[in-house]
Image (cartoon, rainbow, N blue to C red):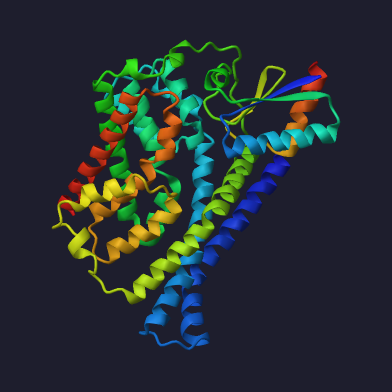
């Protein structure tokens, strides 16, 4: 890679960033103009506000997604599962759980790699509980979920979500570690022999930018439709369903709503893009934040497909414990936020 | 004759990687056998922690992502040179 092409790459990046900023700042006036001037809808009409809401939110979220997924992907090129394993090696439980949960946020992760990752961590001597802290945090604290929460409801809700994910991952991993369940890991995991070794790739900036561009294409390509449909449903409800419609069943007073939300969330399997606009709508219509976040974590973090994947390396008692501990931790976090907020 | 292994338990990305790899082989018209490795003990023997992985003549050339057509072409060309 010559310095000349690298320079050109950064110039392109600067131009794209500028265009992004311009676009981000014109969508609000543009959405208002289309709804209220071009279509001539009244500013206080239901249809008018719903349309303006939709026309503003869809491009805003898609822009945020592309921009932030790009930035996050660049950061992630500096972290690999191999490096994370090295960072976690030799850490004791407790500190190790905290580290593992934090690394779970920045390490690239796909649920199809959950098993190789699990095996790679455990056989290198990382304690079981620390490994689980990582395996809970990585899928639950997911970049699309964070970006959507930030874009639709502001940084406070996004920060709350990250905090609750971390708390659940640290606590659940620590408890699983204390239960000493190593014997419930499938035996073959402890017996793997390496016949080959891998060397970590050396990446330059052009590679990192290319990787990030690829993940933007992949992630935005995968979720954009969910975002559009989710926001359309949200916009409809925004204009037409009365506020507080859900307060009596999903509000703070209803103590049973947190466990109910978690239980309903387990069989539901959706990606973050589909669930966030719905969760937002629930909050807007009177559901309490803790209950809504518990529901969301349950849908994203506790999924049956993941259980099927993990069944290959975990014996039944450990698999059930894993799910039960996370479910309880999510409920406690839900109650905690209902109580604090 | 190259031995190319695609490591992965059968997720979408593994299938995509296999498809691209076969295209590369066809286009370069090289003699190669493509083997899918789907069992975890066999995958983990290569010491990778993210799938899909691509192994040419027992050397791990990429893992955790789907390399581009051009990249795989380079991997195959390098392997042919080394063989």
Q: Is residue A201 left or right of residue A236?
A: right
Q: Which residue is farthest right?
A: B29
How far across and how far down the image is residue A280, in percent?
Answer: 34, 60
Q: Residue at x 28, y 46 (%)?
A: A263
How far across and how far down the image is residue A184, in percent?
Answer: 34, 19
Q: Residue at x 44, y 87 (%)?
A: A41
Judge whether A240 appears above or below A1 on screen: below
Judge whether B14 appears above or below A125 on screen: below
How far across and how far down the image is residue A72, in percent?
Answer: 49, 44
Q: Is residue A78 left or right of residue A98?
A: right
Quadrant for the N terminus of chain A, please: top right
Judge whether A335 appears above or below A102 on screen: below
The picture quadrant where one finds residue A46 is: bottom left
Whether residue A1 can be seen here: no
Whether residue A111 can be seen here: yes
Quadrant for the C terminus of chain A, please: bottom left
How far across and how far down the image is residue A134, in percent?
Answer: 38, 31
């Amino acid at each position: 890679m010559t310095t000349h092409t690298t320079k050109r790459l950064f110039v392109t990046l600067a131009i794209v960033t500028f265009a992004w900023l311009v676009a981000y700042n014109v969508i609000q006036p543009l959405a208002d103009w289309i709804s209220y001037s071009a279509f001539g809808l009244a500013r206080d009409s239901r249809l008018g506000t719903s349309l303006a809401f939709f026309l503003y939110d869809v491009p805003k979220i898609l822009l945020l997604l592309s921009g932030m997924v790009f930035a996050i992907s660049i950061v992630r090129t500096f972290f690999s599962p191999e490096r994370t394993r090295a960072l976690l090696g030799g850490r004791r439980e407790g500190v190790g759980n905290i580290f593992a949960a934090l690394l779970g946020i920045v390490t690239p992760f796909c649920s199809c790699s959950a098993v190789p990752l699990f095996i790679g961590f455990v056989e290198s001597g990382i304690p079981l509980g620390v490994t689980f802290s990582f395996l809970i945090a990585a899928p639950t604290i997911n970049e699309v979920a964070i970006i959507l929460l930030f874009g639709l409801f502001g940084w406070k809700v996004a920060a709350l979500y990250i905090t609750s994910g971390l708390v659940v991952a640290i606590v659940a991993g620590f408890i699983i570690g204390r239960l000493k369940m190593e014997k419930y890991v499938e035996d073959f995991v402890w017996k793997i022999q390496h016949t080959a070794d891998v060397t970590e790739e050396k990446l330059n900036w052009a590679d990192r930018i290319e990787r990030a561009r690829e993940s933007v294409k992949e992630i935005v390509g995968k979720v954009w439709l969910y975002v559009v449909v989710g926001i359309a449903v949200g916009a409809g409800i925004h204009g037409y369903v009365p506020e507080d419609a859900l307060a009596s069943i999903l509000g703070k007073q209803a103590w049973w709503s947190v466990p109910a939300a978690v239980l309903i969330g387990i069989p539901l399997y959706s990606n973050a893009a589909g669930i966030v606009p719905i969760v937002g709508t629930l909050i807007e219509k009177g559901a309490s934040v803790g209950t809504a976040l518990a529901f969301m974590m349950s849908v994203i973090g506790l999924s049956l497909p993941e259980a099927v994947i993990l069944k290959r390396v975990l014996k039944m008692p450990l698999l059930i414990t894993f799910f039960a501990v996370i479910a309880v931790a999510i409920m406690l976090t839900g109650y905690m936020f209902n109580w604090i907020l | 004759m190259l031995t190319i292994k695609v490591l992965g338990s059968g997720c979408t990305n593994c299938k995509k990687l296999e498809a691209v790899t076969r295209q590369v082989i066809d286009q370069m018209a090289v003699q190669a056998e493509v083997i899918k490795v789907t069992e975890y003990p066999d995958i983990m023997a290569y010491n990778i922690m993210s799938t899909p992985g691509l192994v040419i003549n027992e050397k791990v050339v990429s893992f955790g992502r789907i390399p581009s057509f051009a990249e795989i072409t380079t991997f195959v060309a390098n392997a042919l040179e080394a063989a």
